[in-house]
Amino acid sequence: MTITYFPDMVLFSQELRFSQGGSSEGVVVVTHLSPESNMQTQIEIPLVPDNSHLEVINVVLHNSSTKAHVMQRKYSEWFSSRFGYEVILVYIGSHLRPVLGNLSPNAPMLEKDTSTTWLSTLTNYVPFLGSSRVGNMDSITFADVAPYLVVTEKSLEDVSSRLPEGEDMDITKFRPNIVLAGSANAYDEDFWGGLQISPMADTLDEKKSVYMDLTQNCARCASINWDYETGRVTAGESGTVLKKLMNDRRVDKGTKYSPIFGRYGFLQNAMRECSIAVGDTVEVSKINAARTTFSKSIECLPWMKLALNFGTDWPGLGN
């Protein structure tokens, strides 16, 4: 399920809560807002559930296949009662999905970049839990198509400028994990190929810089038109943001029918355990000579084609 086709998913919000025992004892608190009664209900789901006795099924998200554990019935029943139709909640556990096309920083034929620098400030972020590698390629959990999505406040301002005076675009509808301030121009990030995120001065002794590759553009769909309080298209011109961006933001030849907003990111190989925080300094470490072009397939990865086309079990794909 994705918001594009199931807009009532926007009525669910999530919060991570951790105990002193760390992530293994944390919970995901899911809150559902009923548009009819305007009442909220909640359920707590263990962040790392015991999956030793859970059924394993195949799951496909954006044509990327994996295996997942079916959570206890009480969780699926809670979600089903809110959606109004039967759904199943699954837990990916140690399984991973392959990153498809040329999204992975290790994919062949990525555009060459020209190194340069530019400084910004991280203003918001959401932590990502769980990514690894399949062969020479990056892999992900149930994130959309990449573990990170980077956007800038300057580009958000441009979107807001297309709306009536006094009406601002809700950044939540773009669903980024990292929001940066300080860009000189809207959509400068279209050309960014890498970031270095450095800790604030008072935390230098505790944290190391984080290095991130920005590989491809984020093509937008009708989900940016949804109202997060009703689960339907937003009333007024805010419900036509996708159409407004169609005029000049279809800048990726690989997704020529969709406007672009944001860049997909992957931690570099040695950065699997790290942390970032609001207020960290961000340096644009690579700037591409031209915008990247998204490709759904890569001809020189026959093993991945086999896994996708024939459902073959491969190490790291959940077998």
Image (cartoon, rainbow, N blue to C red):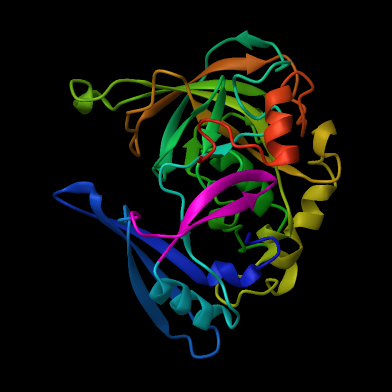
Give the side of residue 140 with respect to residue 220, left or right. left
Residue 164 seen in the figure: no
Q: Nearer the viewer, residue 199 or 94?
A: 94
Quarter-wise, where is residue 57 in the image?
Answer: bottom right
Quarter-wise, where is residue 100 in the image?
Answer: top right
Q: Residue at the spot x=55%, y=89% of the render?
A: 36
Question: Is 67 part of what is drawn in magenta?
Answer: yes
Residue 61 is situated, as x and y percent measured from the top left of the image, at 64, 50
Q: Nearer the viewer, residue 99 or 14?
A: 99
Q: Where, quadrant-wise, is the N terminus in this rendering?
A: bottom right
Residue 196 drawn above or below residue 126: above
Residue 249 is situated, as x and y percent measured from the top left of the image, at 78, 41
Residue 237 drawn above or below residue 195: below
Q: Nearer the viewer, residue 200 or 148?
A: 148
Residue 316 is situated, as x and y percent measured from the top left of the image, at 50, 33
- Which residues lie in the magenta part? 51-71
Question: Is 207 part of what is drawn in magenta?
Answer: no
Residue 247 seen in the figure: yes
Q: Nearer the viewer, residue 224 or 121?
A: 224
Specify the farthest residue to the bottom.
Answer: 37
Q: Residue at the spot x=61%, y=63% of the render?
A: 166
Determine the main secondary structure of the stretch shown in magenta. Answer: strand
